[in-house]
Amino acid sequence: MTWEASITLFTLLLVMLLLLTTRRSPDVILVAGVSLLTLCGVLSPKQAIAGLSNEGVVTILVLFAVAAGLQATGAMVWMSKGWLGRPKSLFNAQWRMMLPVGVLSAFMNNTPLVAILLPAIHDWARQHQLVVSKLLIPLSFASILGGACTLVGTSTNLVINGWLIDETGHPGIGMFELAWVGVPCALLGFGFILATSKWLLPDRQAPVSIHHDPRTYTVEVIVEPGGAMSGQTVEEAGLRHLPGVFLMEIERQHETLSVVAPTERLQDHDRLVFVGVIESVIDLHKISGLLPALDQVFKLDAPRSKRILIEAVVSNRCPLIGKTIRQGRFRTHYHAVVIAVARSGKKLAGRLGDIRLRPGDTLLLEASPAFLGQQRDNRDFYLVSKVSDEHPTNHAKAPMAIGILMVLVLVVAVGGMSMLTAALCAAGCMLFTGCCATSDMRKAIDWQVYIALSASIGLGKAMQVSGLDQHLVQPLISLAQGDPQVTLALLYGVSMCLAGMISAKAAAVLMLPLALAAATDLQVSYLPMTMAVLFSCSMTLATPIGYPTNLMIYGPGGYRFSDYLRIGFPLSLLLWGVCVVLIPMVWPL
C-alpha cells in the first residue's frame, strides 16, 4: 500500500472514530479530515474544495431556499395536514408519516422532499407533543427506501443508470424496473422501523410543556368568514389539544361560552380566547382560518410578511398605564399592534382591546423591524426584544407557493430541465411573488449540511486518487473464489460499507467498474452485479454521512452517530439478505 493510500485510510478511520465517539458537529470533523489530506499532499486544494461546487450539493442548498417559501406561507403545514392529521400514538404518527413519504419519494427525488418536509414534521411533532428524534430518522429512512423503488427516486439511481448506458451500451433501466426489489425492501424496512423504533430510536427531545415558560399569554383570534375553520368542531379544527395553550372561551354575538366542548362547532366571526406560552401563541397565528382579533393589525404600514414579533415589558412610566389597549390607541402611539398580553401568569378576562395596562405587563407585538431601534431605549418599556426569527404567516400566498413546488416537480419529472436549474427558478419565483423575503431564505439554508456534504465528496476523491479503493476492494472480491452468488453478495456488502463511510454516489462510482470487471471475469451478466451496487448505495442507512437526507436530520433531531448504527445497521443487514436473494431472480446471473 502506498504512503498516500495509508494516510487516507488513517484519516478515514480517524474521521469515523470522531463521528462515533464525540459530539462535535459532523461538518467540523469532515472538514478537518479533508484539511489533513490536503496538508499531506493527497488532495490538491482544487480537489479538496471541489464538493462546494458539486451540482447535487448546490441543489440541496437551493432547495432549502425553496422550502423557506413554503414555510413562510404555511403551505407545508397545509399540505401535510391532510395526511399527517392528529396521531393518537407514536406508532400511529410514524406510519402516517412514512407511508406517504415513501410513495412521494418514489416519484420525487428524496433529498428535496426531505428538505421541504423537515420543518413541517418538526412543527407537527411539537404541536402534538411527539419526540422529534423518534420521527426524523423514520422520515429519512422512508424517503431512502421509497426512492429505491423507481429510477427517478434518487439521484444515485440516475448516476448508475447513466454509467450503465455509457459503459455497456445498455438501453437504460426502466422507470419501474427497480420496483421488483425496491418495493419488498421498502415494506420490510417500514415494518422493521415501526416494530423496533420504540427501543432503537433515542428519546432526545422532550415534548413541549406549558411549564417551560412562566409567562402565560392571553390572546384572541377570530374565525375567518368562509375560512378553513368555519363550520368545523373544536376537535376537528385541531384546537383542543394544542401543546402549551388551551381555548378558554368563545365569544359569539355578545354571548360568551366559558366552557367550550370539543363538539362545539365554530362559526364565522367567532372570537376565540386562548391562554398559553409564547411558542404556542405564535403557532396560533400560523393556523390558516384564524385571524388576529384586532383590526389594527391590518392597518400597519409594512406588509405582514415583513413584520416581526416583539416582546415588550411595560414600565411604570408608560403613558398608557391605566388605559385599555383600545383607549390608549397603541397602534397610533407606537406603530405596533398588541396581539397578546401576559401578566404574572394570570388569566386575563375580557377582550384583548379592553385589557387595562399595568407596569410589568408583557406585550407580544406585531411591528416593523424599525420598532426595535426606535423603542429599545424608550422609558415606556423596561425591555424590548425580538421573538426568535418569527414572522406572521402569509397564508394568502400559500396557493402560489404550492403551485411553484408543483411546477418544480413536474418539469424535473418530464425531463424538461435539471433539478438545480428548476430549483433556482423556483427559489427566484418564491422571491418574485412575495412568498418569502430574502432574509428568510438566507436563514433557511443549513450551512452545516452544505459544508458536510462538500467535505464528504472530498474524502471520496481522496480514496480514488490515492488508490485506497483498489486496496480495500480487490482482496474482498477474491474471497468469492469464482462463485457468482457469493461475488454478488460481497459486492453488495463492500458497496454498503463504502457508502456508509463516504457517500452513496462516491461509493457507486468506485464500485461500478469493479462490478463490471467481476462479471466479465466470471462470464456472467453484468446487470445483477450492477444492481447489487445500485441497491446497496441507494439504501444507505447505517451512518449520517452516507446519504444526504441522513445528514440533513442530524442536527434537527439531536442525533449522535451511534443512533444511526443502532437502527440502521440491523436493517441494512436484513436488506442485504433480501437483495442477494431477489436480485438474481429478477436479473439472472
Image: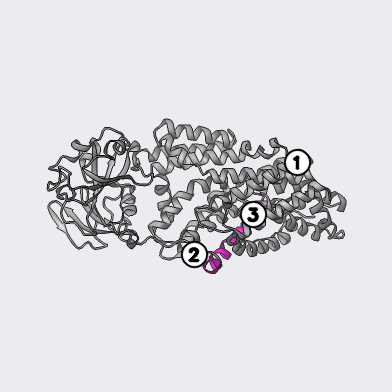
Q: Are marks 3 and 1 in contact (CB under 8 Å)?
A: no
Q: CA distance from mark 2 to mark 1?
A: 43 Å
Name the residue located 40 percent from the left edge and 65 percent from the top edge.
88
State the residue in front, 226 or 47: 47
Which of disc 3 and disc 2 is earlier in sequence?
2
Crowdedness of circle 1 by 10 Å Cα count: few (<14), some, many (20+)? few
Residue under circle 1? 41
Viewer-nearest of labels 2 and 1?
Answer: 1
Q: Are marks 2 and 1 in contact (CB under 8 Å)?
A: no
**Residue 542: percent from left, percent from top:** 63, 58
Q: CA distance from mark 3 to mark 1?
A: 33 Å
- Secondary structure of the residue carrying tag 1 is loop
Q: Which mark is residue 169?
A: none
- Secondary structure of the residue carrying tag 2 is loop
**Residue 326: percent from left, percent from top:** 15, 43
Which of disc 1 and disc 2 is earlier in sequence?
1
Task: Confirm whether the magenta stretch covers residue 372.
Answer: no
Residue under circle 2? 203
Q: Dividing the picture into quarters, in which one does residue 128 lie?
A: bottom left
Q: Are marks 2 and 3 in contact (CB under 8 Å)?
A: no
Q: Is 354 on the left-hand or right-hand side of 284? A: left
Specify the quadrant that holds the C terminus. Answer: bottom right
**Residue 426: percent from left, percent from top:** 49, 35
Viewer-nearest of labels 3 and 1?
Answer: 1
Q: Residue type at mark 2?
A: Asp
State the residue in front, 386 or 504: 386
| Magenta span of residues | 170-199
Q: Is residue 478 above or below residue 466?
A: below
Residue under circle 3? 539
- Secondary structure of the residue carrying tag 3 is loop
Q: Is 479 on the left-hand or right-hand side of 571? A: right
Q: Main secondary structure of the magenta part?
A: helix
